[in-house]
């Protein structure tokens, strides 16, 4: 195809202008992303780049930790992957270094922002390569528009702001195919140079993720089919030289050709500047000399690290079934968090154009097969984590070979396919383009964009081990999943956000014939709709009013396989019309980094549309399980006002039904306080049963009791409760256990016991 020089200059001017803009604006950012600390595996790649730039090595030392906190001083850094071969006396970074090495010039001057700018250069280099490749078959403007949309209007753009090698691997794949696929205008010495560059490029990506090497099949087959033996030899030579260089440099810097061979690896938390996050274990009495000081716990954990000490993550037995594989393939294509067609819309368009115009090319068929093989590798061998681990946008693992889809395309006809791709990108990934750092909002997460239309209507990936932003609630023998910004577990109930469409997924090992819910409104004149598969119930509730709802869902949403067993999935959609603000306390786990002082709890608010309690199938709610016999009870005769104490309680189940110990409708031990024949405390603290109690069985429990706030003579009345149904005493003729207890004044702060 002939190209007008004027059009050529216009395309070059446009691409040059866009490249300058995208390269320069990361250098102006205060920090390269949100949250304001390093996420996923970024810390290792970031520190490697700085260590190579300033020290010329890959060793972790205190000065490297200090550099980290100068740029990221606000929070501890989790999951810094390290390695050692001498018991943590010498510590190296435990990730492949090649991406960080290429980023050294910019990282040395601009730190983390320099790494983001380097990623931008890689992205724009792919746009240039795509344009130059597509103009062989199309007008220059069409080629540039398609290539820009292919790379910029996809999840690829988000990974520019991740200080990780995804963009580097993608650029290497693009270079391998750009230089390696057959073309009529390249021959002689130029062909040999291109072949060597193709082989060298794919090694750079495969050094990070070996399965990427599959894309090399297409250019090698092209040389073989046309019997270009010198090109094959040069390609192999380029690959070997590249492999020798990257492994040789690694060996010189760390003593090992790869961070996965012959080393101990461990992820650690970096808590504070001026201190190594892991050190040799302290010497143990009687052990041979050679230990170190603190860090014994970390070193012991390193020996058993799940990250492994070799390529075990790559060479393993398949851990999936045909049913699970089929389910994951569906998620891979159109899952709301990972779907190929949603996050890489031009990729789907590229496959369609290939089938229309390029299906006569055997090289491109092999390329498509190799891309499918890479996807199947992740789906088969790490079936629970194929999307890219806990930190991902779209499919973080598969995006490494995404450029391969552009090289499936030859002719871009009809032309309206280009605006079609732009329209699809606008619908599916617009929020990613305008908030590439991650969108804010209630319960923020990197996956916040899926809360928008249309992504929220696509399937939720129920097979994945960890999809951030969701509550996973155990209710008896069920597992319930809901979005964190829409649901909030509160003991045995769930708060549903008001004025919202709330989805809850119920995963059960048995079909659910009937589901019983207890619904309570906190707002006046509230309307709540519950819809579960084929069943629907509309409720009108006043403030504080509670109603019980029975739904027969019929067929499940889907039946999936897990561990070779069927799992029945039902979706409950609850829609409260309005709500009311309620405050709650969020508790945080103990701080493992005292350097960062923080509160262990925080008061927060939630707009509660309804309180939802799942009561199971409802069959046992009317059961007569209230007959009991009291055994030996040991209670104190005197306690302090407000004191929490225990009562040794033994009782026997004399009914014909078991006392359940799980779910919202379970049996708990509780009590009432009386004084002068008046009820002082009606709803006492709950003490759960340790196990279900069968008919005729007994249970012994140290029951937790809180004393009244005022001194005096009280009667403690022990009374089990069938939660959300009835107190035992209301159904068994007041068969309770009563004991008189004297409540003494509370002990003054700082004083000893005055009893």
Image (cartoon, rainbow, N blue to C red):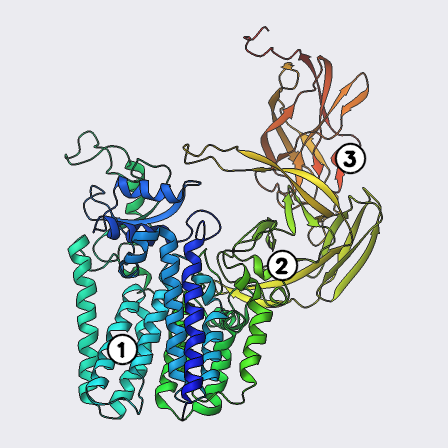
Query: Disc 1 to disc 3, how far (Cα)?
Result: 83 Å
Label annotation for residue 505: 2
**Circles 1, 3 touching at the beta carbon (< 8 Å):** no
Q: What's the residue at 22%, 58% (across, down)?
A: 261
Above/below status of 652 relative to 502:
above
- Earlier sequence position, callout 3 versus callout 2: 2
Q: Quadrant of the N terminus?
A: bottom left
Query: Disc 3 to disc 2, how far (Cα)?
Result: 37 Å
Q: Which residue is mark 1?
A: 198
Q: Secondary structure at mark 1?
A: helix
- Earlier sequence position, callout 1 versus callout 3: 1
Q: Quadrant of the C terminus?
A: top right
In this image, 148 relative to 490: left or right?
left
Residue 97 location, x and y as percent? 27, 58
Task: Answer few, some or many: residues within 10 Å of disc 3's Cα (few below 14, many 20 plus, some between 14 and 19).
Answer: some
Query: Disc 1 to disc 2, how far (Cα)?
Result: 47 Å
Above/below status of 719 relative to 12:
above
Above/below status of 7 relative to 718:
below
Q: What's the residue at 30%, 88% (across, down)?
A: 182
Label annotation for residue 732: 3
Front disc: 3 or 2? 2
**Circles 1, 2 touching at the beta carbon (< 8 Å):** no
In this view of the protein, which residue sits in the foreground, 737 or 237? Answer: 237
Front disc: 1 or 2? 1
Label annotation for residue 44: none
Q: What's the residue at 25%, 89% (across, down)?
A: 224
In this view of the protein, which residue sits in the foreground, 469 or 696? Answer: 469
In this view of the protein, which residue sits in the foreground, 54 or 195? Answer: 54
Q: What's the residue at 78%, 35% (across, down)?
A: 732
Q: Secondary structure at mark 3?
A: loop
Above/below status of 416 relative to 445:
below
> Residue 295 falls in which quadrant of the image?
top left
């Amino acid at each position: 195809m002939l190209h007008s020089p004027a059009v050529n200059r216009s395309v070059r001017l446009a691409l040059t202008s866009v490249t300058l803009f995208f390269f320069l604006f990361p250098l102006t950012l205060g920090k390269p992303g949100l949250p304001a600390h390093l996420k996923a595996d970024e810390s290792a790649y970031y520190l490697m780049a700085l260590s190579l730039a300033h020290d010329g090595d890959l060793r972790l030392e205190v000065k490297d930790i200090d550099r980290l906190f100068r740029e990221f001083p606000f929070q501890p850094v989790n999951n810094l992957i390290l390695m050692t071969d001498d018991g943590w006396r010498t510590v190296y970074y435990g990730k492949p270094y090649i991406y960080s090495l290429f980023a050294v010039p910019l990282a040395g001057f601009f730190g983390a922002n320099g790494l983001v700018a380097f990623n931008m250069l890689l992205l724009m280099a792919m746009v240039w390569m795509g344009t130059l490749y597509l103009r062989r078959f199309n007008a220059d403007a069409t080629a540039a528009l398609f290539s820009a949309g292919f790379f910029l209007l996809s999840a690829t753009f988000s990974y520019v702001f991740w200080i990780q090698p995804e963009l580097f691997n993608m650029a290497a794949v693009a270079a391998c195919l750009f230089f390696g696929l057959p073309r009529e205008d390249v021959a002689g010495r130029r062909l040999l140079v291109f072949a060597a560059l193709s082989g060298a490029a794919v090694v750079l990506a495969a050094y990070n993720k070996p399965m990427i090497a599959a894309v090399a099949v297409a250019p090698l087959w092209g040389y073989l089919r046309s019997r270009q033996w010198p090109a094959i030899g040069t390609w192999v030579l380029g690959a070997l030289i590249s492999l020798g260089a990257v492994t040789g440099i690694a060996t010189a810097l760390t003593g090992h050709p790869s961070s996965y061979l012959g080393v101990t690896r461990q992820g650690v938390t970096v808590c504070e500047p001026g201190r190594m996050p892991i050190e040799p274990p302290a010497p143990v009495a009687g052990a041979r000399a050679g230990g170190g000081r603190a860090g014994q716990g970390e070193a012991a954990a390193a020996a058993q690290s799940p990250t492994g000490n070799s390529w075990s993550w790559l060479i393993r037995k398949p851990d999936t079934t045909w049913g699970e594989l089929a389910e994951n393939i569906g998620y891979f294509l159109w899952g709301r968090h990972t779907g190929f067609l949603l996050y890489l819309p031009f990729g789907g368009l590229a496959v369609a154009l290939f089938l229309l115009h390029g299906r006569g090319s055997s090289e491109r068929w092999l390329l498509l097969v190799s891309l499918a093989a890479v996807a199947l590798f992740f789906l088969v061998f790490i079936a629970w984590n194929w999307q890219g681990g806990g930190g991902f946008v779209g499919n973080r693992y598969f995006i490494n070979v995404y450029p391969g889809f552009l090289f499936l395309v030859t002719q871009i006809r009809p032309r309206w396919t280009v605006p079609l791709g732009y329209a699809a990108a606008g619908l599916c990934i617009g929020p990613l383009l305008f908030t590439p750092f991650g969108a804010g909002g209630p319960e923020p997460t990197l996956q916040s964009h899926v809360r928008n239309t249309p992504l929220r209507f696509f399937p939720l990936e129920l097979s994945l081990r960890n999809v951030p932003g969701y509550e996973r609630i155990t209710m008896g023998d069920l597992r319930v999943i809901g979005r964190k910004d829409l649901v909030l577990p509160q003991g045995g109930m769930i708060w549903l956000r008001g004025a919202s469409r709330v989805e809850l997924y119920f995963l059960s090992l048995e079909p659910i014939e009937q589901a019983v819910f207890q619904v309570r409104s906190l707002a006046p004149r509230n309307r709540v709709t519950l819809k579960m598969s084929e069943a629907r119930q509309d409720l009108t509730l006043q403030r504080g009013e509670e109603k019980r709802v029975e739904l027969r869902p019929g067929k499940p949403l889907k039946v999936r396989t897990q561990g070779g067993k069927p799992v029945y999935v039902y979706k409950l959609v609850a829609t409260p019309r309005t709500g009311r603000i309620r405050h709650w306390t969020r508790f945080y786990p103990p701080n493992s980094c005292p350097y960062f002082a923080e509160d262990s709890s925080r008061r927060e608010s939630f707009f509660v549309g309804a309180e939802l309690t799942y009561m199971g199938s409802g069959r046992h709610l009317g059961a007569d399980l209230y007959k009991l016999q009291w055994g030996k009870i040991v209670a104190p005769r005197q306690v302090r006002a407000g004191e929490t104490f225990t009562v040794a309680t033994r009782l026997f189940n004399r009914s014909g039904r078991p006392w359940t110990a799980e779910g919202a409708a379970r049996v708990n031990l509780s009590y009432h306080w009386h004084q002068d024949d008046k009820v002082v405390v009606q709803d006492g603290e709950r003490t759960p049963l340790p196990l279900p109690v069968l008919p005729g069985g007994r249970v012994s429990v140290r029951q937790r009791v809180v004393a009244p706030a005022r001194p005096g003579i009280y009667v403690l009345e022990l009374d089990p409760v069938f939660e959300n149904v009835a107190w035992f005493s209301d159904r068994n003729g007041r068969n309770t256990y009563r004991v008189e207890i004297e409540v003494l004044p509370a002990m003054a702060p700082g004083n000893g016991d005055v009893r």
